[in-house]
Amino acid sequence: MTNDEIRAAVVTALRGVAPEVDPATLRTDLPLRGQVDLDSIDYLNFLMAIHAALGVDIPEAAYAQVATLDDCVAYVASHGPQAQPVPPGER
């Protein structure tokens, strides 16, 4: 799965919780909760939607790692079922 495909799926998950979101005006480097005005329940529902769509578990300890759209894409790319483990000699 490409980063563009992941980004599209994350935006779709976000729009499922906040349908008023305009992807064209969404800053990829700013925290989503502030841009979209998500309360804690909405944010949790958003993360659960990512899990449902992409099969990526985002534990509470990782919430700070998925604050922005770019963060979400990077997290899914590195933790998703499509992620390939890096051999020890190539880290």
Image: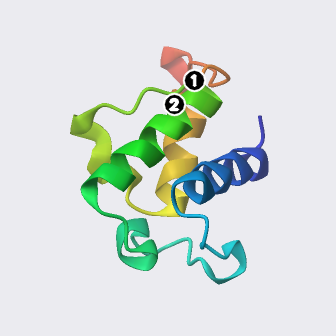
Between the C-alphas of marks 2 and 1, the distance is 5 Å
Q: How is the image coloured?
A: rainbow
Nearest to the observer: residue 26 or residue 74: 26
Q: Secondary structure at mark 2?
A: helix
- Disc 2 marks a residue whose amino acid type is His
Nearest to the observer: residue 68 or residue 51: 51
The x and y percentages for residue 73 are 58, 49
Vertical comparison of 17 with 87: above or below: below
The x and y percentages for residue 59 are 30, 31
Q: Residue at x 49, y 73 (%)?
A: 29
The residue tagged 2 is: 51
Q: Residue at x 45, y 63 (%)?
A: 68
Q: Secondary structure at mark 1?
A: loop
Residue 27, located in which quarter of the rendered image? bottom right
Check the image and name the residue furthest to the bottom.
25
Vertical comparison of 75 with 23: above or below: above
Label disc, if present, on residue 55 of the rendered structure: 1
| Callout 2 crowding tier (Cα within 10 Å): few <14, some 14–19, many ≥20 | some
Vertical comparison of 46 with 23: above or below: above
Q: Residue at x 38, y 33 (%)?
A: 58
How many dots with numbers?
2
| Callout 1 crowding tier (Cα within 10 Å): few <14, some 14–19, many ≥20 | some
The x and y percentages for residue 26 are 59, 77
Check the image and name the residue furthest to the left.
61
Is 4 displayed left or right of 52 in the figure? right
Label disc, if present, on residue 47 of the rendered structure: none
The x and y percentages for residue 30 are 44, 75
For the residues labelled 2 and 1, say whether their Cβ atoms are less than 8 Å apart: yes
Q: Residue at x 30, y 46 (%)?
A: 63
Residue 23, located in which quarter of the rendered image? bottom right
- Disc 1 marks a residue whose amino acid type is Gly
Q: Quadrant of the N terminus?
A: top right
